[in-house]
Amino acid sequence: MYDTIIIGAGMSGLAAGIRLAYYEQRVCILERHYTIGGLNSFYRLRGRDYDVGLHALTNVTPKGTKTGPLARLLRQLRLKWDDFAIAPQLGSEIAFPSKRLKFDNNERTLRDEVAWVFPKEADNFDRLAREIIDYDDLSETHAGISAREVVSSIIRDPLLVEMIFCPLMYYGSARENDMDWGQFSIMFRSIFLEGLGRPAAGVRLILKHLVRKFRALGGELKLRSGVKRIITENGRATGVVLDNDEVLEARNVVSSAGWCETMRLCDDGQPVLNSRAPGQLTFCETIASLDAQPRDLGHDLTITFFNDHDKFAWQKPEELCDLRSGVICSPNNFAYDSPLDDCTIRITALANFDRWRALEEPNYRLEKLRWYDRICESAVRFVPDYRAHVTDTDMFTPTTIVRFSGHDNGAVYGAPEKQFDGRTHLNNLFICGTDQGFVGIIGSIISGISMANQHCLTRA
Amino acid sequence: MTPAEIREEVLDILSDIAPDEDLSNLDDNVRFREQLELDSMDFLDIVMELRKRYRVQIPEDDYINLASMNTTVTYLEPLMKDIQREKV
C-alpha cells in the first residue's frame, strides 16, 4: 500500500513526488513511457542532444531573488539556484510585418520599446503592467474574465494588443483566440516581468535533479508502467491497474495525465467524461542542426515570435500547419559561460492534430518533409536564412506529442478549462500539471508542489 | 526541550526552509511574515518539519500560533517539553 501513487513522471509528477517523499510518504510514480519528462523531455539522435518542448524557462529571476515561482519551487524542493544553472536569454523579439518589439530579462526594455514604437501607448502599457495580478492574488474568478477585453480597454492600438498576446499565447494559452485574465497575468509576469533562461545542459539537467532527489528520498519510479485503470470504490480511488494487469493500492492518487484523460481512467464510468472540452492547440516543430553558431549567421536573438499580418490568430489551423505565425528559438542564444557545441534552430508552428493523425504512412512521412520545408521558409522571412548551414534535421508533429505525453489531441497546454483546486469527483483523486492550471516548466513544477501540499501532505 | 532549545530548533527549520535568509537579526516579537520572505507554502513546511523531526502534530486551526518566534515557542512548549532534542 502506497501513501500516494502519482500518474506521470513529468515535471509536475516528479515535483509532487519529491514533496511527499521528503515528508516520508511511500510514493510511487508511474510512467507509461520508457523515459521521464512527458511534455518536457529530451532525446539523443545521431550523436546530438535535443530537448523536447523546452525553448526557454519562463519566470527566470536572478540568483538571490526571494519571491516568485522560481524562488518558491527551489525552496520547496530544497534545491539550490545553482542546481539549475540557468543562463539568461540574450534578448527576444516580437516581429510583425510593420513593427518589431524587443524584450529581455530587464522589464524596462519592453517598456522602452513600446514607448519608442508605439509612443501614444507608453502610459497605457504602464497601466496594463500595473493591472497585472500577482500570483498569490489569483483566484478562480479571474478565469472567467476575457483578457482580450481587459487589455483592449487599456491599450488603444489593436496592433500592440496583438503583439502582446502573441508570445503569451504561444507560451501558455490552452484557449483559442483569447486567454483568461488570470492566465494572461501569469504569462505576462513570467515572460515580460521576470524573464527567460535556459540551463546549458537543457531540460535534462532539471529532470535529472528532480529524479535524483526523488530517488534519494526513497521514492519509487516505475517506467514502462502505464496505468490502465484507476480503481474506484464508494467515491474513492483505492489504487490503479497497470497495463500489465498488476494492481497497486494507494491512499491517494495524483494524476498528471490531464483532466479528460484521468476521468477516462476511472472505472466508475465517470459521468464528467464528456463535460469538459479537450484542448485543440498543438504544434509542429522543426529542429535544424547547424554547422555554425546562429550568431555567426547574423542571428543573435533568443526567441523570435513572428506573425505575418496585423491580426494574430491563435486557433486550430485548417491545414496541417498554420504558416502565418511561429516561434523561432535558438538554444545557443543564451548567456552561457561558454558557447554550446551543438548549434540549433527550432521553429514551432500551430498544427492540426486531426489532419496529422489521419495521415498514413508513407504520406505522414512525406507531409513531414513537405511541412518541414514550408515552416522553415516561413520563418526565414523574419530571421537570417540559415538553411545552407543545416547538417541534420528532425521534426515532431502533434501525433508525436500524443505518443510521448498521452495528452488528447497533443494539446500542449491541455484543456481550456482548468481545475485550479485539483479536485475530482473522487475525494482522494487529484490532478496536477497542465490541466490543473499552471503551464510551462516552472508552472508545472509549482502545480505538482501545490497539489501535493494541499491534498496529500497532511493526510498520510 | 526547553524553550531555548525549541527556539534553536525552529531557527534550524527556518534556515532549512529558507537557506538564503539571514536569521541572525530575527526579532522574536515580530511576525515571521513581516521580516522574512515566507509564504504559506513555507509555513506549511514549518509544520511538516516539526512532524518529521519530532512527530509533533499541529492541527490546521493552530497554524495561526506560528506567527512569530515568541508565539511559536509558547505554543510548542507544552507539546515538546518531554521531547529530547536531536543532535544536529
Image (cartoon, rainbow, N blue to C red):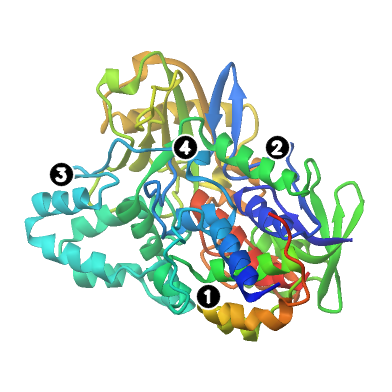
What is the spatial separation of the Cα atoms under label 2 and label 1, in whole angstroms?
45 Å
The percent coordinates of residue A331 (x first, y second) are: 41, 31
Secondary structure of the residue carrying tag 3 is loop
User: Which chain is mark 3 on?
Assistant: A
Labels 4 and 1 in the same subunit: no
**Disc sitting over residue A85 in the figure:** 4
Task: Write down the quadrant of residue A223 in the picture.
Answer: top right
Image height of A454 relative to A81, above or below: below
Instruction: Out of B1 and A231, give the one closest to the viewer.
Output: B1
Labels 2 and 3 in the same subunit: yes
Mark 4 vs 2, N-terminal side: 2
Residue type at the position of mark 4: Ala
- The residue wearing badge 2 is A35
Instruction: Out of A169 and B23, give the one closest to the viewer.
Output: B23
**Disc sitting over residue B69 in the figure:** 1
The residue carrying pointer 3 sits among few (fewer than 14), some (14 to 19) or many (20 or more) residues within 10 Å by Cα, namely few
Residue type at the position of mark 2: Thr
Image height of A359 relative to A275, above or below: above
Mark 4 vs 3, N-terminal side: 4
**Disc sitting over residue A267 in the figure:** none
Labels 2 and 1 in the same subunit: no
Mark 2 vs 3, N-terminal side: 2
The residue carrying pointer 1 sits among few (fewer than 14), some (14 to 19) or many (20 or more) residues within 10 Å by Cα, namely many
Q: Which numbered disc, 4 or 3, marks the residue closer to the eye?
A: 4
What is the spatial separation of the Cα atoms under label 4 and label 1, in whole angstroms?
34 Å
Q: Which numbered disc, 3 or 1, marks the residue closer to the eye?
A: 1
Disc 2 vs disc 3: Cβ atoms closer than 8 Å?
Answer: no
The residue carrying pointer 2 sits among few (fewer than 14), some (14 to 19) or many (20 or more) residues within 10 Å by Cα, namely some
**Disc sitting over residue A98 in the figure:** 3
